[in-house]
Image (spheres, rainbow, N blue to C red):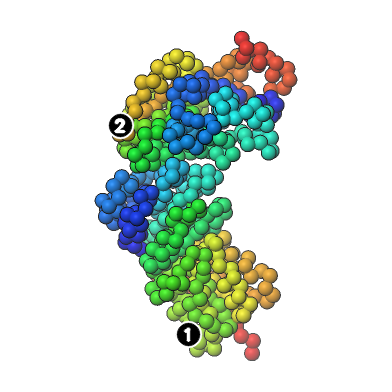
């Protein structure tokens, strides 16, 4: 994802002379081709996150298109008031691209985690939240939105979902139906699409035919796709590397609230700090963010009546 | 204005009126009929609590009307206790939540230079605002990137000293690689001298102007750091203030 970020900046930067990239000491070496191709439009501001967000808003104020790239907790949680006032309240559009969200920095522990970035940012007016978990998705979604009137947050995960998706289906604000199904819907975002796809075979053996929906845009959320599936299956599992508070689960619940008889069951991060270390996979396993976790959830929450 | 509104920060506004008057009379390039004019210099009131002083200056130089001032802080007014850039002509960015206008002005100055433009960017912060970490992040970045057309005016009315002693603010700016001048913030001639000799090059040291002021200057009863910080006068007090201001 890091290399794709740098490649996309390199290509778009040469087409649009207004694009300016500011990084907080990450991706610095990968950005050197952009820095050479777009002289005077690349800045590494070190560890000055709050001022860097304000700086980005100032670039926007004078007609440029800022792309600010920081580590997620320091971008969203440390600097939230700067995002809220300097960009949002002032109505300056721009692009915020985070890396190291959720528990990507698993071995460092909770100081470097953020589980509530889209819950926090979606409260701000005129924002878009995009979570591309494949290089192609970031490239396409960035090109579709970077120059519009919104403040757009891109959450770049360390792990890709690895599922092949037709590029023509990748459109901002549009969910993607990965697989048609009949009796249970799995709505997955980010890297967890992989777990959803992997679970299908086991679920089939259990006599379930799951419908799999992939969400790369959290805001605006494609509620139409979700509700049409909910009306059919009445059973939904949400999968996300985000807090159970204010994330995909909450938004799906909101979307289906008027549909009678629908049950939504989440696999997400509990409202607590993750105090374990290890690797990304260790956390996924502990949280049930795996194919096995989905199967277990189906067994516990959606047991068929005999 | 504050008397009619029943709300405001009179002393914070009074201590910056001479600074603003000199800037808008003699220094800044702007067109009040076209506040978004591309050739303008930028002014950002990061110390947003001085908005009543700022609005009076914006009215004096044609951005606002007396009628606008009369609506100060009313529900439908364009003029709030802290200025909203989407509503007030001549306001470039929100201030008042301290430590915000300065980093935004940094981005403006950098962005103008990236585009090969020579517009200057002036930002006014308070000495107590200098308690904020984002201020020093900005000072560091501006010096590193040699923003020669960024000018930070510090209204040093000694607010911080009530709680945290700041020492010499100009020495601090110099230590971070800025030019820094100390000046009497109520002496218009001295202010003009400093503003006229400001360096004006795309790449160079940014410049701080430490304006030493008295909070509430102009009406003896308001001066200092007492209850008047955010108090609106009653009828009797209003008459006393006006009499002292006229003196």
The chain identifier of the residue carrying mark 2 reads: B
- State the image quarter where residue B12 is shown: top right
Quick one: A89 or B21, which is closer to the camera? B21
Can residue A120 be seen at all in this image of the molecule?
no
Q: Measuring from the top left, give residue A4's x and y in whole percent.
A: 34, 62
Could you tell me which secondary element the residue under label 1 belongs to? helix
Please give the name of the residue rendered at 44% of the width and 24% of the height, measured from the top-left corner: B27
How many C-alpha atoms fall within 10 Å of the one at disc 1: few (<14), some, or many (≥20)? some
**Please, is residue B32 above or below residue B107 in the view?**
above
Q: Which residue corresponds to the image point at 55% horizontal and 39% vertical from the top-left? A: B85
In the image, taking residue A64 as reference, residue A188 lies left or right, namely: right
Viewer-closest of B38 and A305: B38
Total of numbered circles in the picture?
A: 2
Chain letter of the residue beneath label 1 in the structure image: A
- Place of residue A48 in the rendered image (x, y in percent of width and height, measured from the top left): 39, 43
**Residue closest to the far right:** B235
Q: Which residue is mark 1?
A: A202
Point out which mark residue B204 bears: 2
Q: Nearer the viewer, residue B227 or A5?
A: A5
């Amino acid at each position: 994802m890091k290399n794709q970020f740098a490649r996309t900046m390199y290509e778009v930067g040469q087409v649009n002379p207004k694009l300016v990239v500011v990084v907080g000491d990450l991706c610095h070496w990968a950005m050197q081709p952009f820095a050479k191709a777009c002289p005077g439009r690349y800045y590494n501001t070190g560890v000055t996150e709050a001022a860097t967000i304000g700086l980005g808003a100032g670039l926007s104020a004078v007609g440029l298109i800022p792309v600010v790239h920081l580590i997620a907790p320091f971008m969203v949680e440390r600097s939230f008031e700067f995002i809220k006032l300097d960009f949002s309240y002032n109505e300056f559009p721009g692009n915020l691209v985070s890396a190291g969200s959720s528990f990507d920095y698993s071995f460092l522990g909770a100081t470097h985690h953020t589980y509530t970035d889209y819950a926090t940012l979606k409260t701000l007016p005129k924002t878009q939240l995009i979570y591309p978990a494949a290089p192609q998705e970031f490239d396409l979604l960035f090109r579709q939105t970077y120059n519009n009137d919104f403040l757009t947050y891109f959450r770049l995960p360390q792990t890709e979902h690895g599922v092949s998706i037709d590029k023509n289906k990748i459109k901002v604000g549009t969910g993607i139906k990965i697989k048609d199904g009949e009796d249970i819907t799995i709505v997955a975002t980010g890297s967890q699409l992989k777990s959803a796809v992997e679970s299908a075979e086991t679920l089939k053996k259990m006599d379930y035919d799951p419908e799999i929906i992939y969400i790369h845009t959290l805001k605006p959320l494609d509620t139409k796709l979700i509700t049409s599936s909910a009306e059919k299956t009445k059973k939904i599992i949400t999968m996300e590397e985000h807090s159970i508070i204010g994330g995909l689960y909450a938004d799906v619940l909101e979307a289906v609230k008027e549909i009678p008889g629908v049950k939504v069951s989440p696999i997400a991060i509990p409202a607590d700090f993750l105090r374990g270390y290890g690797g990304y996979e260790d956390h996924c396993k502990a949280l049930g963010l795996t194919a096995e976790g989905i199967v277990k959830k189906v067994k516990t929450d959606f047991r068929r009546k005999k | 204005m504050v008397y009619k509104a029943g709300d405001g920060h009179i002393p914070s506004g009074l201590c910056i009126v001479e600074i603003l008057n000199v800037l808008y009379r003699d220094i800044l390039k702007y067109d009040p009929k076209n506040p978004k004019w591309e050739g303008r210099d930028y002014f950002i009131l990061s110390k947003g609590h001085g908005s009543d002083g700022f609005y009076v200056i914006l009215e004096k130089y044609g951005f606002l009307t007396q009628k606008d001032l009369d609506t100060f802080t009313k529900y439908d007014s364009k003029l709030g206790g802290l200025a909203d850039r989407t509503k007030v002509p001549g306001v470039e960015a929100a201030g008042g939540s301290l430590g915000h206008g300065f980093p935004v002005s940094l981005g403006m100055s950098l962005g103008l230079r990236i585009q090969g433009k020579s517009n200057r960017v002036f930002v006014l912060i308070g000495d107590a605002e200098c308690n904020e970490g984002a201020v020093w992040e900005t000072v560091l970045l501006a010096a590193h990137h040699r923003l020669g057309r960024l000018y930070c005016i510090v209204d040093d009315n000694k607010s911080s000293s009530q709680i945290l002693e700041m020492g010499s603010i100009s020495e601090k700016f110099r230590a971070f690689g800025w030019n820094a001048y100390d000046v009497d913030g109520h002496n218009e001639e001295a202010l003009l001298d400093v503003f006229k000799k400001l360096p004006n090059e795309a790449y160079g040291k940014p410049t701080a102007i430490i304006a030493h002021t008295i909070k509430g200057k102009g009406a003896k009863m308001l001066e200092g750091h007492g209850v008047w910080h955010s108090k609106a006068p009653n009828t009797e007090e209003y008459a006393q203030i006006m009499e002292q201001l006229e003196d």
